[in-house]
Image (cartoon, grey):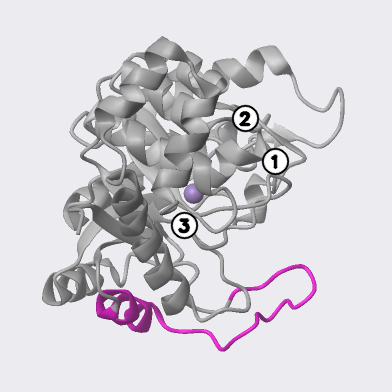
Amino acid sequence: MRDIKVSCGIWFLGATSDRFVRAGYRPDKTIRERFELAASIEGVQGLEMHYPTEVTDDTYKDLKQLADDLGMEIVQFCPHLWVDPKYKFGQFTNPDPAIRQSALDLAKRTTDIAQYMEAHIMVYWPAQDGYDYPFQIDHRRALDWLVENLAAWCDHNPEQKIAVEYKAWEPRSRILLPTIGHVMTIVNEINRPNLGVNIDVGHAFMMKENLAESFSLACRYGKLFHTHWNDNWKLFDDDVIVGTVNLWETLEALFWLDEWGYDGWFGLDLFPYREDPADAVRESIRNLQFGYELLDRVPREAWYEVFRSADAAKIAQLQRQILGG
Ligand SMILES: [Mn+2]
């Protein structure tokens, strides 16, 4: 068994709603029940959550105690800006300066609590920072505000790491920083040691990115702070079980994370509407582990030989060898 650190988002362990079944496809669970459920799944060592929705000012101390009692690390602790209708026209890029300030204030407050929770990482997801129409936003100023507020948030506590997670659309028709290239440009411009990237593999697939290439760009600058795992059909953020759709891209990504020496967390960001969420988590962990087992069927040197020859016939042969052929 490969020694990988796996964390689980708590947001999909309760009721999961879509636009049509708005109450969700199963009964909801309390936050305590979600902590306990995640901890009961073999291979889960950490939890990911949001403030001030899932974790509140009134509950964070008790929930930290519960996590400690369950032997769970708090891996990701994130300001839940996009679920508040106040931010419907933007979080850090809202055209109203008072709303921008309130987003930054909430992010800073999240940092303070993240420190108490001993969270490894905080994530900034632009989500509502975007647009639905041409001519809807001031593209020059929106980038200024995004950079200014991210930098100010980083400087609030240089000890707490922040990772920007990119996604091209949903909830907005277009979200700012839609690709690894956009994010790396901004992260390298801001240039703070505590600012990096969270690559959600499903978000990369939506933009037809090849995971190995996206991971490598982030790793080149030492900026791959976190990873989110799931899968989709490259049409939408389906968040289905890891490795079930895009097997080869997922395997190549695991190969390159190993080559780069990635020692961070493998966060599961799934959204099982109809499946038992514990099953989806369990199978995703098995598929990550099995991915490394599959890779072990071919000596690394054989792949490096391919990199020198670029021989596609040899690639097909090695792929069959991986599949037991
Ligand atoms: Mn994610």
Q: Nearer the viewer, residue 31 or 323?
A: 323
Residue at image mark 2: 178
Per the image, label 2 sits on a secondary structure element best described as: loop
Q: Is residue 82 left or right of residue 322?
A: right
Q: Residues within 10 Å of mark 2 (few under 14, many from 20)?
A: many
On the question of residue 106 being in view, the answer is: no
User: In the image, what residue occupies the spot 42% across and 37% down?
Assistant: 318
Q: Tell me which amino acid carries mark 2.
A: Pro
39 drawn magenta: yes
> Cβ(mark 1) to ligand 1 < 8 Å?
no
Q: Tell me which amino acid carries mark 3.
A: Asp
Residue at image mark 1: 169
Q: Which residues are magenta?
A: 16-40
Q: Residue 36, labelled with which disc?
A: none
Q: Are marks 2 and 1 in contact (CB under 8 Å)?
A: yes
C-alpha gap between disc 2 and disc 3? 18 Å
Q: Which mark is nearer the camera, 1 or 3?
A: 3
Of pointers 2 and 1, the one earlier in the residue sequence: 1
Percent coordinates x, y for residue 176 in the rendering = 64, 29
Q: Tell me which amino acid carries mark 1.
A: Trp
C-alpha gap between disc 1 and disc 3? 16 Å
Per the image, label 1 sits on a secondary structure element best described as: loop
Residue 289 vs 319, above or below: the answer is: below
Of pointers 1 and 3, the one earlier in the residue sequence: 1
Residue at image mark 3: 269
Residue 105 vs 119, above or below: the answer is: above
C-alpha gap between disc 2 and disc 1? 8 Å
Per the image, label 3 sits on a secondary structure element best described as: loop
Residue positioned most to the right: 134
